Image: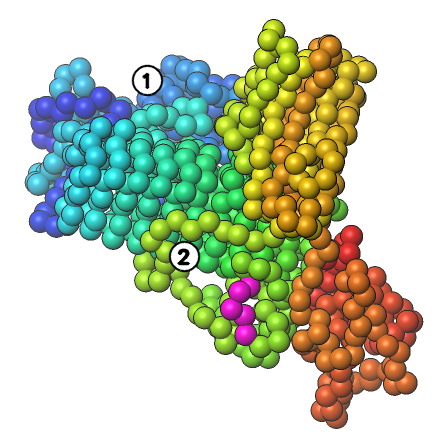
Amino acid sequence: MHSGNIYVADFTGTLPANENQLFIKNGSTVTPLWEARWPNISAYTLPGLMNGVAVADNGGLNTITDADLTSTGVNWNGAKIWVRGGNAYQGMTSQVNSYNSSTGVLTYASITGDYAALYPKPGSTYFLSGILDALDAPNEWYIDSAAHKVYLWAPGGGAPANVEVKMRKTAFNLNGKNYIQLAGIQTFAANITMDGSNNNLLDGVKAEYVYFSNYSQNTTNPDQLNGGIAIVGNDNEIKNSTIAFSSGTLININGSGNRIVNNYVHDGSYMASYDPLLKLGSGTNNLISGNKLENSGRYIIYWNNGVAEISYNDISNGMWLSRDGALIYAWGTDLGNSNIHHNLIHDSVHGSTANDMRVGLYFDNYTENVVAHHNVIYNNDVGIQMNTPGNYKLIYNNTVVNNPTASIGYGGDSSSPYKNELYGTRVFNNIFTDPVSLTADVVRGFNTITGDGLNFANAASNNYRLNINSTAVNMGAIIPGITDGYVDAAPDAGAYEYGGTDWTAGTSATAPTSYNPVATPYMNLIYNSGFEKLLEGWTPWTTSPSTATATDGNIEGAYANSDFRKRGVRTRLKLGAGGGVEQLITGLSPNTKYKFVAWVYTDTAGQAINVGVLNYGGAAIDVSQSTANQYVRKEVEFTTGATDTSARVRIWRAAGATGNAYADDTGLFPMTDYDPGVYKNQALGKTSITASGALGFPRTPDRRLDGGVLQHGRYRTAMGQDRSGPQLRAGQDQLAALLHGNGYPHLSRRHRAAVQRFDLRDQDDRL
């Protein structure tokens, strides 16, 4: 015994001091123990950690002031500190190097990756640990590495029994191994590594407490990121397994064709860094399907790079220890037309702070090329966030409810020239019950934008399937590849089709076991459109041996949004004189109009960069731009020949040009008028359709709507008579005409409110 309830013993641990971990194991019962700390906690869980923090009175660079420290009676010099400063995006750790017990002022060593927005300020949260005097409660321990002693206050007091110390980091090292299967195996307090490994299988594995470290600096740490199950390789699979408990990431994927299917993955990112429960680091054709993923200090899924299908997962309870993040998050990356579908994405709000930007699905600045459909997103601050700039996002048939700040919104740096740009983004067939905010360039329509009349099956139990009399039934447009298999006159808005095939998410779901790419109109058809994979997919050519075609990395350093050069952030195309790049696009439709787009600029006034299309069934088309030091969007429209199904797009400069020119964020998509395919079914012969897709409404002798209701595109009178009213899916111009004299000049305020329940916007005749 050391004193009171604190016992001391020799310590023979072999791990680095920051990775020590102790447990009490009594048969299959595991009781975690934690390093002595202040303030105390009742359990080493995410809720316990969220509530077990001190609040600073003031702070600054490497400094915290807190009057409560003076009453602890502890000299905190030399202690470890975990601090969530400034904008509270993340937690980071350091060591206290001075402490004034009279004023409650402490300073700590500089933190790698720290910056002004993270410096402590009034209200910042933190905790202290790592000194013997902090050991004052059950379940706490302290290790004196120099003296090789361990001190412990056992749960319930008394002499400790059945105490185990973590002695090794890795249970199975599969690095460089191929075609290995681990089935039905349990590991405890150790990880599994697969670096340079292919075609391995983990089936029915139970891996708990895979990693711990109390060190966390910068946005990400290699040990925290790779301390769990780290996959670096191709065609590996984890299925039917439980992966749980880590201070950092539980599963990290770098490679292609990997599959994470039907697993329970929970409780990670206890340090609240950018190392999430599951990270998609790189690669293509990865599958995350049919899993239950829950409980993280920050993100559940952080999408750093690569192409993936994320489907039929139950994703919940991230953001326990941070703000301005999400359950699924991506920033500054080309998602390559990844497919996020049929997921439950919910409950990222914890604690009493309102509007802390805890988001369900978050496409942060510079993120592009993704399809998100048939997701149910609820109980977050914001349902879907799309920050600017960010191109080619297709948001279809999602049910987004009970996200009080916004169902869907956007944001961007106010000084950025691209602060209002989400070019190529389309938002259709969604249910939005909370505020909606989109940039003017977003094409949108057929969205139900209020909770009135939705009549969910059981909203109180988060069952957002539709009943037959829901206002969302038959209120969607036909979108090939998205609404296939709809029933009745038209697709429903939202994630569930009334009377259609039902679906569930999580480990009980019937979910894909192999990657399936999505195919739907208006996806960006350019591969590697932002040059993040350097020139992969592009063919460079030159007429001047002394001039290279290359890419710039990190755009000369800083990431400031206000810098006009920041389009895709990470890379851009750089061209000298007499050369360029081109890409062959296949799978086009004959006799169809397309548009090729690129943002370009030059660093020398009067010197041109050219954007063009050729080999499509017609004469080559090029447009040029010579504006210096400002990106300009250049567009080339072309129509494929009667039998042509491919085209070449190019970006080039003439021989003799001076200086350099740059390009970024290329895109290619069809320009055909959007045909929602439902008017004839829904309008009951009361509308006409023009060649451009616009609607015309015949004037009728009886234009009064007295005492009736508008429902499903029809008008039911107060006497119960069913009349074929105006088609509620018309564009806003048609609705305005109906409301203000061209159709029903006497429409009451109540009936106008009913019409306004729907988002019926028509843009460029393509809806």
| Disc 2 target residue | 312
Residue under the image location 56 percent in, 42 percent down = 586
Give the overall secondary structure of the magenta segment: loop
The answer to whether residue 518 is left or right of residue 137 is right
| Residue 333 seen | yes
Give the answer, above or below, for where 298 lies relative to 493. above
Identify which amino acid the numbered label 2 is placed on: Tyr
**Along the line of sight, the residue nearer the viewer: 582 or 275:** 582
Task: Indicate whether residue 414 is drawn in magenta.
Answer: no
Q: Which type of secondary structure does the marked residue at label 2 adopt?
A: loop
Circle 1/circle 2 CB separation < 8 Å: no
User: Where the C terminus falls, by quadrant?
Assistant: bottom right
Q: Which type of secondary structure does the marked residue at label 1 adopt?
A: loop
The quadrant in which residue 573 appears is top right
Residue under the image location 48 percent in, 55 percent down = 341
Give the answer, above or below, for where 317 lies relative to 101. below
Identify which amino acid the numbered label 1 is placed on: Gly
Task: Indicate whether residue 486 is drawn in magenta.
Answer: yes
Report the disc number at residue 444.
Answer: none
Residue 410, percent from left and from top: 65, 44
Residue 435, percent from left and from top: 66, 55
Task: Give the class, few, some or many, for how many residues have Cα within 10 Å of label 1's Cα (few <14, many ≥20).
Answer: some
Magenta residues span 483-487
| Disc 1 target residue | 78
| Residue 560 seen | no
Residue under the image location 71 percent in, 13 percent down = 655
Give the answer, above or below, for where 234 lies relative to 762. above
**Along the line of sight, the residue nearer the viewer: 423 or 670:** 670
Residue 662, percent from left and from top: 66, 21
Give the answer, above or below, for where 374 lies relative to 52. below
